[in-house]
Amino acid sequence: MNMGYVEPSKEDVEAFIIEKKPVFDDINFDPEILMQKIQKDLTWMEVAKERGTSSTALQTELSKYRKRVAELMKEVNAMKLGEELVLLVDGRAVIMQLAEVADLDRIHRGMICMD
């Protein structure tokens, strides 16, 4: 872990959740719930009622989810050049590798050449 890295703020974690929508097999939280709450300016009670669950259950899962996302953000920020990280994106395993800026053209074309 990068010792100089600061813990991500709640706002940073929520922005990451809204943008990336990470999924974890062992946490039953849909990122769309958070987006709905923010976009519609709802309380957790209102969101829970719409979903047919309790606000306590939603907040418990969100707390676990935020913690896991913060850990993921720290892992990503601590990566070294060439290091790989396997993520679950939309139910599919995706390998993320930290590349140099010079490699971005190849990445945008959909392939990474491993030297």
Image (spheres, rainbow, N blue to C red):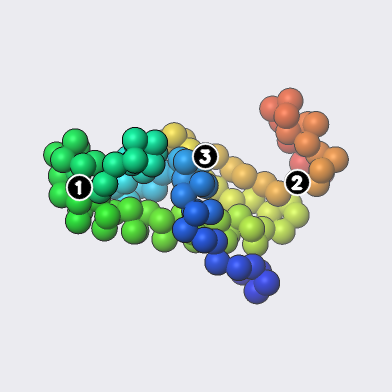
Horizontally, residue 87 falls left or right of residue 42, namely right
Q: Answer with the quarter of the image where residue 46 lies.
A: top left
Q: Identify the residue at image location x=41%, y=56%.
A: 66
Q: Position of residue 6 (x, y in %)?
A: 60, 68
The three-letter code of the residue at mark 3 reads Glu
Q: Which residue is mark 1?
A: 45
Label 2 or label 3, whichever lies nearer to me, is 3
Q: Relative to residue 110, is residue 19 depicted above or below?
A: below
Q: Position of residue 90 (x, y in %)?
A: 44, 34
Q: Identify the residue at image location x=65%, y=74%.
A: 3
Which mark sits nearer the N-terminus, 1 or 3?
3
Q: Which residue is mark 3?
A: 19
For the question of whether residue 32 can be seen, the reply is no
Q: Which mark is residue 99?
A: 2
Q: Relative to residue 10, is residue 40 depicted above or below?
A: above
Q: Identify the residue at image location x=47%, y=58%.
A: 10
